[in-house]
Image: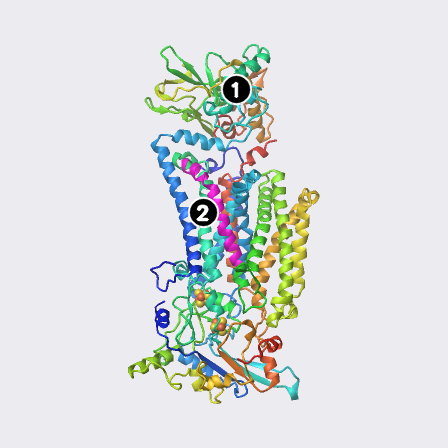
Amino acid sequence: MDKQLIVRGVTRMEFKRFITYLIPWFILLGIGLYAMYLVFRYGLNHTNMDNRFAFGLWIYFDLAIIALGAGAFFTGLLLYVFKRHEFKSVINSAVVIGFICYSGAIAALVVDVGQPLRAWFTLYRPNAHSMLAEVTFCLTLYLFVLAVEYVPIVLKNRKLKQIPSFLVFEFKLHTFMPILAGIGALLSFFHQGSLGGMFGVLNGQPFAFRETVFVFPSTFFLFVLSAIAAGPSFVLLTTWIVSKISGKRVVTKNVFMSLGKISGILLIVYVLFKSIDSLIWLNKTSPAVGFSAADHYGFAPFGIWILSVEIIVLGLIPGLILISKKLRAKTPWLLTGAVLACAGVALNRFVTTIQTLSLPTLPFADFLTYVPTWEEVAIFLMVIAYGVIVYSFSFRYLPLFPQERELNRR
Amino acid sequence: MFPWVHEFRWEIGHLIFTGGFALVLVAILTAITLVFKKVYQIYKRRQVEKILWQATFEDFPSQTRTCRHAISGVLKQRVCNNHFECGACAVHKQLIEHGIPEKVLAAAGDYGNMEIFGLNIPLDRMYHRGHTWVKQDDEGNYLVGLDDFGKRLIGKPEEVVLPEIGSRLYANGTAWKVKRGKADTRILSPVDGEVLETGDDEKGWYLKIKPAADNSDTSHLLKSGKEVKAWFMKELERLQFALASDGIGVSLADGGVLIDDLPKSHPDADWDGVYGEMFLEP
Amino acid sequence: MDTRNKIKSDNRKHPRYGMVVDLDRCKGCGSCSIACAVENNQQPATPDMNNRTGVTWMRLYKVHNGEPFPDSRAVFVPMFCQQCDDTPCLYVCPQNAVELDPMTGIVAQIPERCFGCRYCMAACPYEARYFNWWDPVWPEGMEKTLNPDVSPRMRGVVEKCNFCHGRWQKARAKAAAEGRRELREDEYVPACVESCPMGALTFGNLDDPDSKVSKLVKDPDTFKILGQFGTKPKVYYRTTRSWVRRAVNRDVYSEKKEKVHG
Ligand code: SF4
Ligand code: SF4
């Protein structure tokens, strides 16, 4: 039965081995589900968040995986709208990753809010001025789009495609992909941006507050830029990891290099704007309300080093590595660049959420630290485990990499 | 968000916000509705088999999609993007109108007899790229059978599921199904028509088909000896390639003759994968 | 919005309630906190809670001058929702759970709409918002102390000071019964103001030039905490001691810019 479901002409590990390899992930999933039960049953006191540290690990995690998940829409945009056909070989995988990232983020959000059952109210009667309302709208719609994009991949499963109506449906749905990719790009632009805007509008948090550029705070655009810069790198990394774990070549080298190149170019643009933004913020926006750089970076461990690491080590350097044709051609460099790029966006999201809340605004309030509880960590790991499991099953039973069959002939 | 909801305000910001999202939602839903509508139309117009073939075709690697004129050497290089429906292909039409294939093939010299690795390839019939042949009998009906290459690939099948008499077949749609060991595949029908009679290996043909009144196009079939031979050469190459995916050095020929029952002589190869390649069902 | 439309149609001038906290009078006794908790049915603290997870709409900070022993001084700063006129928490709430009541200028929190995303808590520079991390539990017998005019909140929603909105409604109902539309100054006073034995809290209509608050607000010793953020709080603080002023407010820049009065 199992064999019947696997893509024709490719080999996958024994079913038993496959399940054995997934067991640890299922355990993590189970622990996470238990933690989720505790939070739903007894409330958010099972976390270490508090009245001032109102956002914690989960919000940080949401922001980070949504940024990394940007690879899905961006690859789709490049393939279907800009007709970069080389990305056909990773689009399915990118869509699955995007779906995992977004559904995982939404799962974490559902645990994170106090009364998840009331969330529909945002859709029914939103506060149009709230960045979070915009995020909610775009996320909901985009997850729907991702699900619609996932469907054709599922229908291409060997057994499922033998049902004629499924395949016909898949074929016709596929003709609408450019439209869906366009819509996906629009929605992603707005929610990636609004996630940044969410913090940029906080005039009560001088660490987060930024000047307005065309209606939105500058972080709106910086978040979009950093997400599309890191997205391709994340697709590159996951693809590489998949090919290492499965021991197969799944795409040709030039696809890796194209992904790296795009990441690199965007990263350089991002670093440029991020630096300008930081300078304006440190010299104008923030002093105007009585906060100097020392007020933001005077508390250990969040010294000014964190800004330099973000901009130089995890921004400029991977950017330069990835735009250099020579370096990018060497796999270790390519991977280093991609890892640094992803780490850079993760650090940026960390600073935006955690550091903002650590810093005091009231002159007599303290600098705070926060350490997540095991429940918070467990739910964080649960989402990762969920991702690994969904991806593993998809890789086993769905044609994620159309080039795989050809590339593995000797 | 909605005008009837308590405290709705007719403000520009509000309208842009909710209007924008309503538009996006409508666009997505319209797209999905259109898909359903198209699927419905396909069923109504009985184009299912055609669409299934087109959907399958999309998944072929470019090797498999090589144009027949590139195989025969008339064109240097060409990947088919017409689902092997030569009747609908502008390039094919032009080439035929100017008689170019004949000229090129004539210039290519004589191919000698049609023995390739001992394959029996009679030229009194037309060949389909899914390894079936079609031959018109005296009454004008089509006899359809598996070509020698296909026969040797399948060897002695455990199971053959033939279509019911009276059922309608479509060119490039499923004609019948075979199962050999762990591998199975469907055999594509070379022509449109109604099944009159079913045969078997003994008879040498599997189906007798009454040509469809609305479609008797056979331009997608290979007829000329040189073209057929070039194609078989290409198929042997593809077979080598497909078998090589397991890394087993497979010798296909025995004393210059293709082995009769390939799965039997190479039981370890991934015949399922090979069938997918060779019978055009990825 | 029904109320808002009605308000537009009548051109009565509505009060803008505000408060002045006299830091020189506050002795940090905590009466205001207790009065507030009792008045507003705040969930009682349990041993599981700490000073960062409990609900204390009215919170006292003890601020030191940082000098060693003989010169060491401390001041108590009552901190609660500053009723910002340019309301950051209202602006960010996706669920419209925060409203600025045009009838009173009070920033109202509507817990029934709140889904507990806590974005407003991140937005508030005064740390004046409290989340119900626990299911509220009133120990046996204590439920008798519940104020029937204020509905208790459930777990998972945010709440904060609303100048004892329940008291305002009650006072208004009483006035209406007597055929009046306006309230007298002493008719509506929040619980904390009433309870302060030192008279450190002054409450009233900021728009009424004759009210005690509006006179105090004009005093040069009165200032807004973090006024430079532009959130336009309606709660003012006042002190004559310069170290207190420096310790409590970051007015280095704002002094130059807005002269802090007002
Ligand atoms: S003090 Fe905080 S809670 Fe009160 S209105 Fe201002 S931002 Fe909102
Ligand atoms: S926690 Fe409640 S009041 Fe605060 S922003 Fe979220 S929904 Fe609004």
Q: Residue at x 59, y 74 (%)?
A: A366
For residue A159, above or below residue B165: below
Which residue occupies the foreground of this view, A257 or B174?
A: A257
Question: Dominant secondary structure of the magenta stretch?
Answer: helix
In which quarter of the view is residue B205 placed?
Answer: top left
Start-end of magenta stretch: A168-195
Report which residue position mark 1 lands on.
B95
- Within 10 angstroms of label 1, few (less than 14), some, or many (20 or more) residues? some
* Chain at tag 2: A
x, y (%) of residue B185?
A: 45, 28
For residue A303, above or below residue B95: below
- Residue B183 in sight from this viewpoint: yes
- Quarter of the picture for ligand 2? bottom left
x, y (%) of residue A98?
A: 51, 48
For the N terminus of chain A, give its image quadrant. Answer: top left
**Amino acid type indicated by mark 2:** Ala
In which quarter of the view is residue B44 placed?
Answer: top left
Q: Secondary structure at mark 2?
A: helix
**Extreme residue toward the right, this view:** A326
Which residue occupies the foreground of this view, B164 or B153?
A: B164
